[in-house]
Amino acid sequence: MAFASRLWLAGGRAELHVWPGGFHGFDVVAPHAVLSRDAVAARAAWLRRQLDGPDTCGVGGSVVRTAPM
């Protein structure tokens, strides 16, 4: 969270997702799990917004909690 906050403070673009139950690399270890598919889809959607240009993605970021903790 600190890294994303520093990016936002510097004017960078970032989204921070909290994936409860997800450990580092969970999407590679269990690529067919629902959590993994959701994480991959979220990354792809973010990248697509970035490539579409500044009119669609804005500056700054957001925090997304994907499930109750």
Image (tube, rainbow, N blue to C red):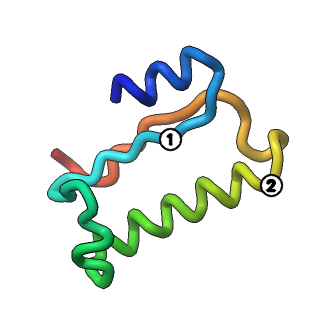
58 on left or right of 7: right
The image shows residue 12 at horizontal and vertical percentages of 62, 28
Q: Which residue is mark 1?
A: 15
Judged from the image, the secondary structure of the residue bearing numbered disc 2 is helix
Q: Quadrant of residue 21?
A: bottom left
Lower position in the chain sequence, tag 1 or tag 2: 1
The residue under label 1 is which amino acid type? Glu
In the image: residue 49, left or right of residue 69: right
Q: Which residue is mark 2?
A: 52
Residue at image location 62% in from the left, 34% down from the top:
13
Q: Is residue 12 above or below residue 45?
A: above
Establish if 28 lies above or below 12: below
Amino acid type, label 2: Asp
Q: CA distance from mark 1 to mark 2?
A: 16 Å
Which residue occupies 51% across, 59% down? 43
Q: How far across and how far down the image is residue 58, in percent? A: 73, 35
Q: Which of the image's four quarters has the C terminus?
A: top left
